[in-house]
Image: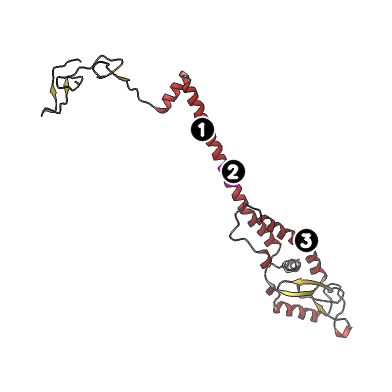
């Protein structure tokens, strides 16, 4: 089972390799080990047939799993990453390659279609499909990285839309309150006054004859002879005298 898992991670197709790493995975040590095991056993790893010169049955080695096979069990040809042409592979490795090829082609095509969507910012760490050896897991990660900018873009657009909706709703509420206040709605006027926290200041007007400012609900304020209005205690500040405060005879204009 572990050997089959190793096989599945090393098969390649076309210009895009199924191998998650480069062709260096097929090391000389692994190849020599597979050849040595086949010579010691002298049998095919698939059908257990006697192989070798003495049996007039040529020994072949799979370029993926490095095991020894007879010509019948190792007659397939598959491409390998970084090497031109087709290379000999056993039945199991060729079957895995045939099963994985359509899936990887579709995954790579999906990732490229996602990356080419107009209006979506491109990811900085996006993988170049045509220049990188890629496996099934890497193809899935490539699709996930291609989807990440789209998800961020839609999240930002949704947040901006919610902010605009809140702003429009607040503007409509303020406009409705202004219309009710303009029409003289006493309840709205009271609510608007409480919201603005306007202090209770008496309205002030001027006398038509003297021009003196006075409150509407108050009697005319007394004025001193110096022309300054008197305070409630009968004192006023006069800039023409040295004293800070002095008492003047009051006179109403």
Q: Which residue is drawn at the image coordinates 30% and 19% (left, top)?
A: 205
Q: Residue furthest bottom?
A: 54
- Mark 2 crowdedness (10 Å alpha carbons): few <14, some 14-19, many ≥20: few
Q: Is residue 178 left or right of residue 67?
A: left
Residue 193's spot in the image, x, y percent? Answer: 41, 24
Earlier-in-chain disc, 1 versus 2 = 2
Q: Is residue 103 left or right of residue 128?
A: right
Q: Which residue is drawn at the image coordinates 49% and 29% (left, top)?
A: 174
| Residue 158 among magenta residues | yes
Residue 52's spot in the image, x, y percent? Answer: 85, 83
Q: Secondary structure at mark 1?
A: helix
Earlier-in-chain disc, 1 versus 3 = 3
Give the extent of the magenta segment.
154-161
Closer to us: mark 2 or mark 3? 2
Q: Is residue 198 left or right of residue 149?
A: left
Residue 242's spot in the image, x, y percent? Answer: 10, 29
Q: Quadrant of the C terminus?
A: top left
Closer to us: mark 1 or mark 2? 1
The disc at residue 102 is 3
**Disc 2/disc 3 C-alpha distance (Å):** 36 Å
Q: Which residue position holds label 1?
A: 171
Q: Nearer the viewer, residue 68 or 93?
A: 93
**Disc 1/disc 3 C-alpha distance (Å):** 56 Å
* In this view, 168 is above or below 12: above
The disc at residue 158 is 2
Q: Quadrant of the N terminus?
A: bottom right
Q: CB of mark 1 within 8 Å of CB of mark 2?
A: no
Main SS class of the magenta portion in the image: helix
Q: Is residue 4 left or right of residue 250?
A: right
Residue 144's spot in the image, x, y percent? Answer: 65, 56
- Mark 3 crowdedness (10 Å alpha carbons): few <14, some 14-19, many ≥20: few
- Mark 1 crowdedness (10 Å alpha carbons): few <14, some 14-19, many ≥20: few
């Amino acid at each position: 089972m572990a050997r089959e898992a190793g096989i599945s991670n090393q098969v390649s197709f076309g210009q895009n390799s199924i191998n998650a790493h480069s062709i260096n995975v097929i090391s000389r040590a692994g190849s020599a080990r597979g050849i040595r095991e086949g010579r010691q056993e002298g049998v095919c790893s698939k059908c257990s047939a006697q192989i070798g010169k003495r049996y007039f049955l040529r020994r072949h080695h799979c370029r993926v799993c490095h095991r020894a096979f007879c010509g019948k069990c190792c007659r397939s040809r598959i491409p390998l990453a970084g090497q031109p042409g087709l290379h000999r592979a056993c039945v199991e490795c060729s079957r895995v390659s045939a099963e994985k090829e359509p899936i990887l082609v579709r995954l790579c095509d999906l990732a490229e279609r996602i990356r080419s969507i107009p209006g979506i910012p491109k990811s900085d760490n996006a993988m170049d499909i045509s220049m990188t050896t890629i496996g099934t897991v890497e193809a899935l990660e490539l699709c996930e990285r291609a989807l990440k900018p789209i998800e961020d873009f839609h999240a930002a657009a949704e947040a901006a839309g919610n902010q605009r909706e809140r702003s429009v709703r607040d503007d409509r509420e303020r406009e409705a309150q202004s219309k009710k206040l303009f029409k003289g709605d006493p309840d709205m006027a009271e609510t608007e006054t409480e919201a603005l926290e306007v202090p209770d200041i008496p309205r002030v007007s001027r006398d038509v004859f003297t021009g003196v400012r006075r409150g509407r609900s108050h009697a005319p304020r007394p004025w001193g002879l110096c022309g300054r209005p008197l305070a409630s205690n009968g004192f006023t500040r006069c800039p023409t005298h040295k004293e800070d405060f002095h008492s003047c005879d009051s006179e109403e204009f």
